[in-house]
Image (cartoon, rainbow, N blue to C red):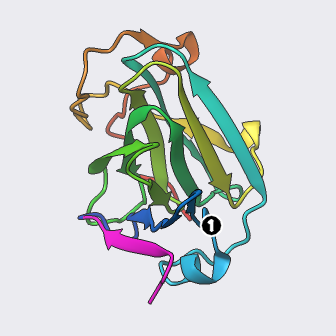
Amino acid sequence: MSQRFKFTSTSIKDLVICERKPIVHELGFFMRFFCDEEFREIGLNKPVVQINQTLTRIKGSVRGMHFQNAPQAENKIVTCIKGEIYDIAIDIRKGSPTFLQWHGEVLSEKNNKSMYIPEGFAHGFQSLSADCEMVYLHTSHYSAESEGALHWNDPSVSIRWPLPVTDVSARDNGHAFVNQNFNGIEL
């Protein structure tokens, strides 16, 4: 049982919310951001090979819904270190009983939560405040050839965004909608 993290399962198998437990003292706090031993408890069995940081300036912006196909399929640990976001993961694993179901979670600099997103999920978020900064830990290097995406407003998924959508990149607006030929990704 983890001493530094509280791991909470979601309604989608293998998708986990991770809450960091700060040690508060007179100078502020100490908090573990990541520990491979403790994350192995929830299924992270690959090393983190890349760490990325993003900034989203406009409240209500949506980014996503991105994923990597095999052989570059990746686990991600997503954390909001400034501001607040509504983080979304969609199960796109072929044959999964929760195929195309999604889970949303508020991640913020104040609630110390991260989302552990295993291989086989599309990921995106909406900024709930201006100037949101996020850190992503990845178990695979980015590969343009392996990249895939679903449209952020696909009616087959029906994500309920908490705010009116104010901004989406041209790239994310151009992603295709799910059609009857899409039956998930192989892992």
Residue 11 image position (x, y, % from top left): 23, 64
The kind of residue tagged 1 is: Phe
- Residue at coordinates 36% horizontally, 65% vertically from top-left? 95
Asked whether, in this view, residue 20 is left or right of residue 145, the answer is left
Q: Considering depth in this image, is 39 or 122 the residue closer to the camera? A: 39
Relative to residue 70, is residue 3 drawn left or right? left
- 6 or 41: nearer the eye? 6
Residue that numbered label 1 is attached to: 34
Query: Image point 26% across, 66% down: which residue?
Result: 97
Q: Is residue 92 visible?
A: yes
| Residue 183 in view | no
> In the picture, residue 14 is in which quadrant?
bottom left
- Say what secondary structure mark 1 lies in: loop
Identify the residue at image location x=40%, y=34%.
84
Q: How many numbered discs? A: 1
Of residues 27 and 75, the one nearer the viewer is: 27
In the image, is residue 57 part of the stretch drawn in magenta? no
Report x, y in % for residue 88: 37, 43
Locate the C terminus by quadrant: bottom right
Please say if 143 is above or below 72: above
Give the vertical position of 160 relative to 119 (above or below): above
The spot of residue 1 in percent (x, y) is 44, 90
Mark 1, other Cα within 10 Å: few <14 / some 14–19 / many ≥20: some
Q: Residue 26, relative to residue 36: is it above or below?
A: above
Work out whether 105 lies above or below 187.
above
Which of the pair 140/41 is nearer the observer? 41
Residue at image coords 69%, 73%: 46
- Taking the view exactly as shown, the residue that stands out farthest to the bottom is 1
Q: Which residues are magenta?
A: 1-10
Among the 4 quarters of the image, the one containing residue 106: top left
